[in-house]
Amino acid sequence: MSHLIEMSRISKAFGGSVALRDVSLALAPGTVHALMGENGAGKSTLMKILAGVYQPDGGDIRRNGRMVSFANPRAALEAGISTVFQELSLLPNMTIAENMFLGREPAGRFGGIDRRRMRQETKVALARLGLDLDPDTLVSELSIAQRQFVEIAHGIDADAGVFILDEPTAALNAADVEVLNRHIRALRDKGKAIVYISHRMDEIFAICDVVTVLKDGQLVGTQPLSEMTQGSLIEMMVGRELEDLFPERDGAAGEVALSICGLRLEPDAKPFSLSVRKGEIIGLAGLEGQGQQKILRALVGQFAPVEGTLTRRGKDKRLPLPKESGVRRWQALGGAFVPEDRKDEGLFLGLGAGQNIAMALHAGRPAIEVAKRYGEVIAATMSKLNVKAAGPAASVASLSGGNQQKVLLGRYLATDADLLLIEEPTRGVDVGAKSEIYKILRDFAKAGGAVLVLSRETLELIGLCDRLYVIHGNTVVSEMRAAEATEHSILDAALSA
């Protein structure tokens, strides 16, 4: 089969650090090609070379058999290579239409910008992805999922032969993922080649035809996915099997750390109760968007339920909590909250890793003073969590997704918090870092802590948790031991409701 793209023996170094060494990749028309590996394996570097962001130190690229080189992203786009990077590149102070046409604004009859045409074509491009958004909306007003879809629409709108999607579904719910997958399949059926970078195994096997695995900047191999299982793919990536990712459960649950009684999330929903004991990791499972996030956010004042009571450390709190002070009240009760969107809601990207960890230790002081005062705690936390960074002063924005998540966890593990609420604990995190985060959470529970977690990845909840509450229609419909649960039994419980 002829290839749309052939990258041969590509090498790239940044200073003394080798990012890629003799990596080859061939993209065939009419295929979805998964590119996988742990963070730092070289996936994004390889794709940024193909997209014209970086220049290779060695090797060559062929497009339809002809040697090519791309001095910049525009040259790559003009050659038919469209990229949606994980780091969203939309400008928040501009409208959707202005972002869609940035650098290629159409001219009107009198030499000005034809904004009417921009709006019309943007509306059509968004409609192809099922988006009913006003093209004049500022990007800053969009949710992270909407921004991601606009970014994807921008890429798909280009008449390209090759599409690179880097973690395209990290912020999308299940319904949005299916819409995206439908368009990916349509592009594939038109003979396009799609590179799909994701850490989500279920997506890889649902949408991709072939997989290439990188490790430490080198090629491990390329295989048809029809010949692989999730276990064999994980073993190819990290050298160990799926079961080995999760630490052992010890089953030693202590006294109740949190009790929720009579919680009614919406006026038409049934009230329910649940509890979390010390030593337990409890998961909120079920179909996407059934109220799991509302439960966690009701406990920190970020969602207002109709009614309910939480009992914590012998104190009863009537819900809803005030939005402006809910998180502080939760922290005063020895609780911590780790939001799904670590970049927008959790981390201070302009500060160092150490300053981010110290934030929960001492509020109200200058950031530099915080970092100095808690130097030993910061160092011990970074060491314990195996945060890979140049040091406490290293910008948290420069760290990998897994290390950013560990810094955010470290902020609360460095305090006396003994109850952790965590949304999507391994979102955008590679397999190796997932295993480390699972161990961190289990160690926290073994030390007498309690964890209440939600995740879109059902296998993650089954492997990580002790008990599961299945949520459907904004209420609890089933409770089960995680060790006995299966994806089928969870789905059956949700749909039977």
Image (tube, rainbow, N blue to C red):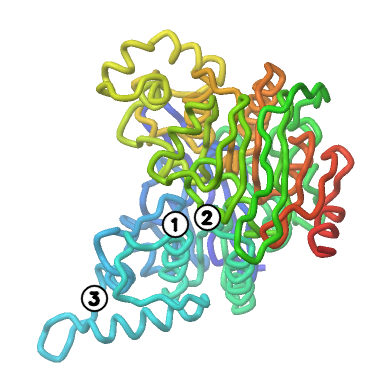
Question: Can you identify the residue that label 3 sits on?
Answer: 105
Q: Residue farthest to the bottom?
A: 109
Callouts 2 and 1 close, C-beta under 8 Å: yes
The quadrant where residue 450 appears: top right
Q: Where residue 98 appears, x then y in whole percent?
A: 27, 71
Marks 2 and 1 sit apart, C-alpha to C-alpha, by 6 Å
Question: Can you identify the residue that label 2 sits on?
Answer: 171
Say whether residue 257 is left or right of residue 118: right
Amino acid type indicated by mark 1: Ile
Q: In the image, what residue occupies the spot 36% across and 77% down?
A: 134
Work out whether residue 63 or residue 183 is closer to the camera in this orientation and state it: 183
Work out whether residue 438 or residue 26 is closer to the camera in this orientation and state it: 438
Marks 3 and 2 sit apart, C-alpha to C-alpha, by 29 Å
Question: Can you identify the residue that label 1 sits on?
Answer: 144
Q: In the image, what residue occupies the spot 68% across and 25% down?
A: 439
Callouts 3 and 2 close, C-beta under 8 Å: no
Helix, strand or loop at label 2? It is: loop
Q: Where residue 244 appears, x then y in whole percent?
A: 78, 30
Q: Residue farthest to the left?
A: 110
In what quadrant of the picture does the N terminus appear?
A: bottom right
Q: Where residue 170 appears, x then y in whole percent?
A: 55, 53
Q: Is residue 332 above or below residue 84?
A: above
Amino acid type indicated by mark 2: Ala
Q: Where residue 163 appears, x then y in whole percent?
A: 51, 65
Q: Can residue 372 be spotted in the picture?
A: yes
